Amino acid sequence: MKRGIHPDYGPVAFRDRATGDVVLTRSTLATRSGGATVEVEGRSYPVVDVDVSVHSHPFWTGQGRVLDSEGRVEAFERRYGRGAR
């Protein structure tokens, strides 16, 4: 690796905008976070706000729904699903 061409890699907090939950990790985004910080366990970390994380995504929270306004799921199940053998 060449020295001096890579961005700084350091601790950063990712904050979910929907739930407010914070995930501490390391990233190169710490240098581009715009100066915003968050206090976690007595230490200050640069923060990156994200719209969706594991704390708010419907798949991981178990609140996922199938949005089907034209009956495509039912048509697929009729053709290839449980009853079409």
Image (cartoon, rainbow, N blue to C red):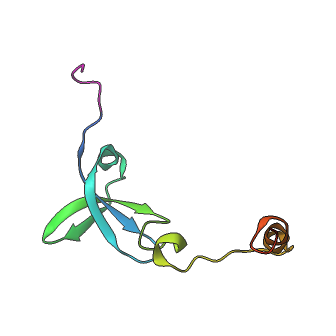
Check the image and report above or below for 39 versus 7: below
Q: Position of residue 59 (x, y in %)?
A: 52, 70
Name the quadrant containing residue 80: bottom right
Say whether residue 51 is left or right of residue 55.
right
Name the quadrant containing residue 22: bottom left
Q: Residue furthest bottom?
A: 63
Q: Quadrant of the C terminus?
A: bottom right
Residue at x 49%, y 66% (from the top left corner)? 52
Q: Residue furthest top?
A: 2
Residue at x 81%, y 67% (from the top left corner)? 76
Q: Quadrant of the N terminus?
A: top left
Q: Position of residue 30 (x, y in %)?
A: 30, 49
Check the image and report above or below for 1 versus 60: above
Residue at x 31%, y 55% (from the top left corner)? 35
Say whether residue 41 is left or right of residue 68.
left
Whether residue 17 is in magenta: the answer is no
Name the quadrant containing residue 53: bottom left
Check the image and report above or below for 80 versus 19: above
Whether residue 5 is in magenta: the answer is yes
**Magenta segment, prevailing SS (helix, strand or loop):** loop
Residues rendered magenta in the picture = 1-6
**Front-most of residues 62 and 11:** 62
Residue at x 46%, y 71% (from the top left corner)? 60
**Front-most of residues 1 and 84:** 84
Q: Residue furthest left?
A: 42
Q: Position of residue 57 (x, y in %)?
A: 50, 70
Q: What is the total number of numbered labels drawn onto the structure image?
A: 0
